[in-house]
Image (tube, rainbow, N blue to C red):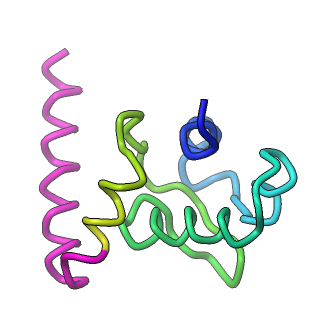
Amino acid sequence: MSSWKLIIQHINNLKIEKETLRPFHLRNNFYISYSTSTSYINYLHQAMFLKRIRRGVYVRIKDIPIDLTIEKIKKFVYLYDYKKRKELIERYWRIQDIKKNIK
């Protein structure tokens, strides 16, 4: 399994807005470089799955889809400005909430 998938699983196991996440700990736990772990966290932060508390400390806001690839998130982050990303993400979260309520 790739380091991206392992990190997504690790982040999804954190309690929403309770447990903190630090890129430094990802590097030690998954044996990836610090720049890789910070870039993964940065992508997830820009895609609004994570919220920055202070420098180097984040919390998870929403579940990250397991099928999300690094290529998809890079395209999403680089193609849209902040306002458009926020609009698309809020729409995505509403759809996910509806799906959960249907089940």
The residue closer to the viewer here, 58 or 68, is: 68
Number of disc labels: 0
Question: Where's the N terminus, which quadrant?
Answer: top right
The residue closer to the viewer here, 51 or 2, is: 2
Q: Residue at x 57, y 70 (%)?
A: 39
Q: Is residue 14 left or right of residue 34?
A: left
Q: Residue at x 13, y 20 (%)?
A: 102
Up-down relation of residue 17 to residue 36 (above or below): above
Up-down relation of residue 1 to residue 97 (above or below): above
Residue 64 x/y as whole percent: 42, 44
Q: Quadrant of residue 80?
A: bottom left
The residue closer to the viewer here, 28 or 86, is: 28
Residue placed farthest to the right in the image?
A: 28
Residue 98 lies in magenta, yes or no?
Answer: yes
Q: Quadrant of residue 55?
A: bottom right
Residue 4 x/y as whole percent: 56, 46
The residue closer to the viewer here, 32 or 100, is: 32
Q: Is residue 17 left or right of residue 68?
A: right
Residue 81 lies in magenta, yes or no?
Answer: yes
Residue 89 x/y as whole percent: 22, 60
Q: What span is in magenta?
A: 78-103
Q: Residue at x 31, y 72 (%)?
A: 77
Q: Is residue 31 left or right of residue 76?
A: right
Residue 8 x/y as whole percent: 54, 43
Question: Where's the C terminus, which quadrant?
Answer: top left
Secondary structure mainly formed by the magenta segment: helix
